[in-house]
Image: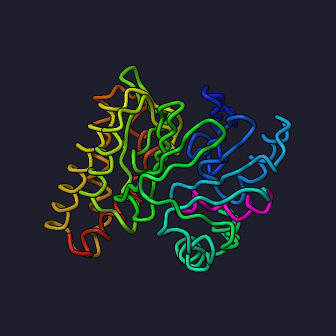
Amino acid sequence: MSSLYEDLGHGITRIDTGMIQPELAACYLLESDSEYALIETGTQHTVPIIMALLASRNIDPLQLRYVIPTHVHLDHAGGVGGLMQQLPNATLLIHPRGARHMIEPDKLRAGAVAVYGEQHFREIYGDIIPVAATRVREMQDAEQMKLGRRTLVFYDTPGHARHHFCVHDLQSNGIFSGDTFGLAYPVLTSDKGPFMLPTTTPVQFEPEALKHSIQRLLALKPDCFYLTHYGKVGNPQPLGQQLITQIDAYVAIAQDARQHASDADLEQAIIQRLTTYTLARARVHGCRQTDGQLQQIIAMDMRLNAQGLVVWLQTGA
């Protein structure tokens, strides 16, 4: 089990958001010259975890300059409103397509409640609190922002979602990649390195755009990626190629399932195919878990990825 907080060097601290289980989702505290920023926020339940870290380090909440979710999916941005209440000097830096959802989150909330039900939504996410428009700044593609002496560069990276950007921290030469550069749960790391998974979560999966975004990030020649799911990974070039290969495989799996399954059975057919494909990759990768353990670890992502592929198929793939 991971600790809640981990110092990654370069003035960066990984924070476990506490969502569902350890090592599922992370956010990051950045420091430079006594100025601070948070990249990702977790859910409303994460706010006390973040505030406890600030208190333990004697960081005045007034020193927090920026709150920066990579996109508005609730495991990344659900805690924004609650944090902004606690951090009165902070400005929310957000993708232009995501700003309105932070200012008026009713649609985000209604969508999540429709999926989870009111009680389950509150258990996982708590609530979504609106942010005053005067405290929101939209970050354009390739725009830069200074935090103390460090420079953050924002890159529009559609494919997982159209409201997604990634943040290149020039000081560490690392990229905070949200969901664009996939997932790598520490429990599945082997001697061959992180076990990478793409994420095609509904509703805006666009395979060609996602591959282009990954290639664009790799072209920056970063030394590492800071994944929301989960933690710091190095040696990015082969990891990116693994993701691109899998995205093509996912597309082929979805198209094959459409040929052989009814509309009613399509999602389940894709889940089964994705699971088989991923278990085979895990064996080649040297993951130590049994098939049953692996299926339990990846089950949620297989279901979400299948749902995203179904939406993609239905919207003109």
User: Where is residue 292 drawn, in percent x and y?
Assistant: 42, 40
- In this picture, is 20 found above or below 314? above
In the image, residue 77 lies in the stretch drawn in magenta: yes
Q: How is the image coloured?
A: rainbow
Main SS, magenta residues: helix
User: Where is residue 236 drawn, in percent x and y?
Assistant: 36, 32
Of 239 and 250, the residue lying toward us: 239
Which residue is at the far top?
191
Of 125 and 274, the residue lying toward us: 125
Q: Which residue is drawn at the image coordinates 46% and 46% (left, top)?
A: 177
Q: Which residue is drawn at the image coordinates 78% and 40% (left, top)?
A: 53
- In this picture, is 234 found above or below 126? above
Q: Quadrant of the C terminus?
A: bottom left
Indicate the quadrant where residue 12 lies: top right
Query: Which stretch did the figure color magenta?
Result: 73-86
Q: Is residue 38 left or right of residue 226?
A: right
- In this picture, is 125 found above or below 2? below
In the image, residue 209 lies in the stretch drawn in magenta: no
Q: Which residue is drawn at the image coordinates 72% and 56% (left, top)?
A: 90
Indicate the quadrant where residue 206 lies: bottom left
Q: Which residue is drawn at the image coordinates 46% and 49% (left, top)?
A: 166
User: Where is residue 221 drawn, in percent x and y?
Assistant: 35, 32
Q: Quadrant of the N terminus?
A: top right
In this rendering, the count of numbered labels is 0
Residue 15 shows up from this direction: no
Q: Is residue 124 left or right of residue 190?
A: right
Q: Is residue 233 left or right of residue 210?
A: right
Residue 77 shows up from this direction: yes
Q: Is residue 179 left or right of residue 159?
A: right
User: Where is residue 163 drawn, in percent x and y?
Assistant: 45, 64
